[in-house]
């Protein structure tokens, strides 16, 4: 993947507003294992406003909701808002080297860590209050044709150019990457079910009524530990190697190379 520019702009305000891409409020009674929140989005209006528009990103736990843009250069929206205005906040943008339709093994979205909480300025709330993620660990991607639901399984601080941004291929590469993310996570997301990559069919069947916490073996494979969970929760079956979503923002002092990342796995498409 192509790295972000390394800019750490943490001041200024976004010009994005909810009315620019919604015509109603989200239905917040939707929970894990059920339908995604019902956002009313005028996709045609958003495309007229900005032809680079690809989707709407929504994280209920953080009340984060923004249109996402795709450009040929990741630097294009560092200082340019969705509406095309020059602004320090920029826009949430899709990694230019990722397949545009979210079909890649790992899709990266970038946004600035703004002091006023706009863009990805609220992502680190997960680190400060683990209950935010454990109570509602879902990220939603809305396109004109589908709603993709992802479940968060890891978040942590890292640095630009770390293995968090590595490309991978094949089952071994996927397993190694996920194991790295789990190992570095700042929180044990005990309500995230993780299937062992070496699990038997019988164990997979039993896992429907049990929850697994995360651990990794010395060879980097994902192993399971079980805890009771609700059968209605959407769980992550890493044995199926679901597509990943990674959100990345700056962390620490302006101009530094520290980053904060959130990793999630696809658990449903509507």
Image: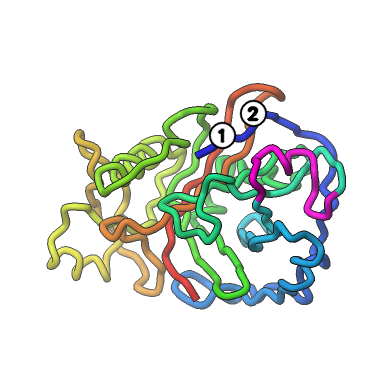
**Relative to 1, is 55 on the left or the right?**
right
Badge count: 2
**Relative to 184, is 255 on the left or the right?**
right
Residue count near mark 1 (Cα–Cα under 10 Å), binned few <14, some 14–19, many ≥20: some
Q: Residue at x 64, y 46 (%)?
A: 72
Looking at the picture, tell me which residue is in the foreground, 34 or 130: 34
Q: Position of residue 240 (x, y in %)?
A: 28, 60
Q: Residue at x 76, y 76 (%)?
A: 24
Q: Is residue 220 magenta?
A: no
Give the residue pinned by disc 1: 3
Give the residue pinned by disc 2: 6
Task: Tell me, yes or no, if residue 236 can be seen here.
Answer: yes
The answer to whether the residues at label 2 and label 1 have Cβ atoms under 8 Å apart is yes
**Relative to 137, is 217 on the left or the right?**
left
Q: Position of residue 66 (x, y in %)?
A: 71, 58
* Label 1 secondary element: loop
Task: Tell me, yes or no, if residue 66 can be seen here.
Answer: no
Q: Is residue 75 magenta?
A: yes
Residue count near mark 2 (Cα–Cα under 10 Å), binned few <14, some 14–19, many ≥20: some
Q: Residue at x 58, y 46 (%)?
A: 95
> Which range of residues does the magenta coloring cover?
71-84
Looking at the picture, tell me which residue is in the foreground, 64 or 90: 90
Q: Position of residue 194 (x, y in %)?
A: 31, 55
Q: CA distance from mark 2 to mark 1?
A: 8 Å
* Label 2 secondary element: loop
**Relative to 119, is 125 on the left or the right?**
left
Q: Residue at x 86, y 42 (%)?
A: 86
């Amino acid at each position: 993947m192509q790295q972000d520019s390394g800019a750490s702009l943490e001041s200024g305000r976004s010009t994005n507003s909810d009315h620019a891409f919604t015509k109603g409020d989200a239905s917040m009674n939707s929970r894990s294992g059920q339908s995604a929140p019902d956002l009313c989005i005028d996709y045609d209006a958003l495309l007229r406003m900005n032809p680079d528009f690809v989707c709407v990103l929504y994280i209920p736990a953080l009340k984060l909701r923004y249109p996402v843009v795709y450009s040929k250069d990741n630097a294009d929206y560092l200082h340019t808002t969705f509406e095309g205005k020059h602004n320090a906040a920029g826009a949430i943008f899709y990694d230019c080297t990722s397949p545009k339709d979210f079909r890649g093994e790992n899709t990266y979205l970038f946004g600035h860590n703004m002091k006023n909480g706009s863009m990805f300025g609220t992502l680190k709330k997960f680190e400060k209050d683990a209950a935010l993620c454990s109570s509602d660990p879902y990220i939603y991607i809305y396109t004109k044709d589908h709603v993709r639901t992802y479940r968060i399984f890891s978040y942590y601080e890292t640095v630009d150019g770390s293995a968090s941004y590595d490309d991978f291929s094949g089952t071994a590469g996927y397993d190694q990457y996920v194991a790295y993310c789990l190992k570095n996570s700042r929180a044990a997301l005990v309500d995230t079910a993780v299937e062992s990559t070496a699990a038997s069919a019988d164990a997979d069947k039993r896992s429907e009524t049990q929850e697994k916490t995360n651990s990794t073996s010395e060879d980097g494979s994902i192993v399971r530990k079980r805890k009771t969970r609700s059968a209605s929760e959407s769980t992550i079956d890493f044995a199926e190697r679901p597509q990943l979503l990674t959100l990345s923002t700056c962390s620490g002092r302006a101009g530094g190379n520290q980053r904060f990342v959130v990793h999630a796995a696809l658990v449903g498409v509507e």
